[in-house]
Image (cartoon, rainbow, N blue to C red):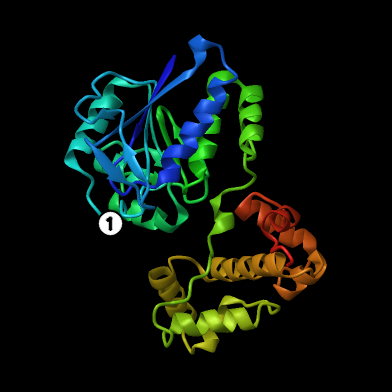
Amino acid sequence: MRSVAVIVFPGVQAIDVSGPMDVFEEANALLPEGDRYLVEVVGPEGIFAASNGMRMEAHRTYDEATSGYDLVLVAGGPKLPDDLPDTGMLECIRRLSKISVRTGSVCTGTFVLGHAGLLGGKRVTTHWQNADALAERFPDAVVDRDRIYVKDGGLLTSAGVTAGIDLALAIVREDHGTEIALTVAKRLVVVAQRQGGQSQFSPYVVAPADPKSPLAAISEFVMANLRSRLTVDELADHIHMSRRSFARLFAEQARTTPAEFVENARLDAARNLLEGSRLALKEIAFECGFGTPHRMRQVFLRRLSVTPGQYRASFQQMEE
């Protein structure tokens, strides 16, 4: 049997635990006894609460988990990006990672792997809201902000919350083939392999903290003039700056180039119209400054890995 340890702690996100466990349990119903997953929850002693108040109790404590597993999976929790993990949990993860086949995380559980010293030189991901914080705290990791899950050798990491289900399905697919993974996905009423990355869920342009800053003035100008070409010279002139100073402002404060900022704004505007209107793709492309539906499709595929039509089908608001 393939043994799996799900590492938990007080304040853990419950679906980070139950989602992957349900995938493995559904797979067990389709597999011969010798190929099934044996899942143990490893955590602190006694009963504790998840972040949503659900009461949990581990099968095995951190100290009791001394044998290797086929997979060690660290669940996430809303406080992990800011708090230091329990030392007993970190020691457990370090110990198990050395004697287990695979080690992974769901959502912000990647921060725990970082504190355990397991991210050095590895390509990883986490929830899009916490990706910058992960890259800043663990600069020796290569953070992929878009992928739903990332496999780098024996290290597996996934994006936010329900992405733990995607990761577990990918593990089942690797272990037992596409047909088993697809059947499990159908039983759970989820897609077997999600289209695109988590960039679909995150805004590209965030309002500057200081509404009176030059960057805020540029952001407002860009959003009001998406149909225009919006060249670097035009943007710099709007806030009375030289082209050189303007480029430096973007590098320091926006952490992007002016051209990418404009494209980000157009993407966000197009996504909002795809979600909240029934305008034709041709109209949306014109309103958002892409010019043609073909050009908008190219940008969507390059940046989100889905077409505008696929994005609309996934996110358009339902009518009452």
Residue 99 falls left or right of residue 123: left
Q: Position of residue 73 (x, y in %)?
A: 38, 33
Task: Say which quadrant the C terminus sits in.
Answer: bottom right
Say few, some or many: other residues with alpha carbon within 10 Å of mark 1 (under 14 / 14 to 19 / 20 or more).
Answer: few
Residue at 44%, 14% in the rendered image: 1
Quadrant of residue 179 in the image?
top right
Using the image as rendered, state which of residue 283 and residue 19 is in the foreground: 19
318 shown above or below 287:
above
Residue receiving disc 1: 82
Q: Residue at image x 46%, y 32%? A: 21
**Closer-to-camera residue (245/137):** 137
Q: Position of residue 286 (x, y in %)?
A: 77, 73
> For the residue marked with disc 1, what is the amino acid?
Asp
The image shows residue 37, relative to residue 285, as above or below, that is above
| Residue 101 shows up from this direction | yes
Percent x, y for residue 14? Answer: 41, 45
Badge count = 1
Q: Position of residue 95 (x, y in %)?
A: 23, 26
The structure residue drawn at horizontal position 61% and vertical position 67%, both measured from the top left corner, is 268
Element marked by disc 1 = loop
Q: Is residue 106 visible?
A: no
Query: Would residue 258 be found to the left or right of residue 99 on screen?
Result: right
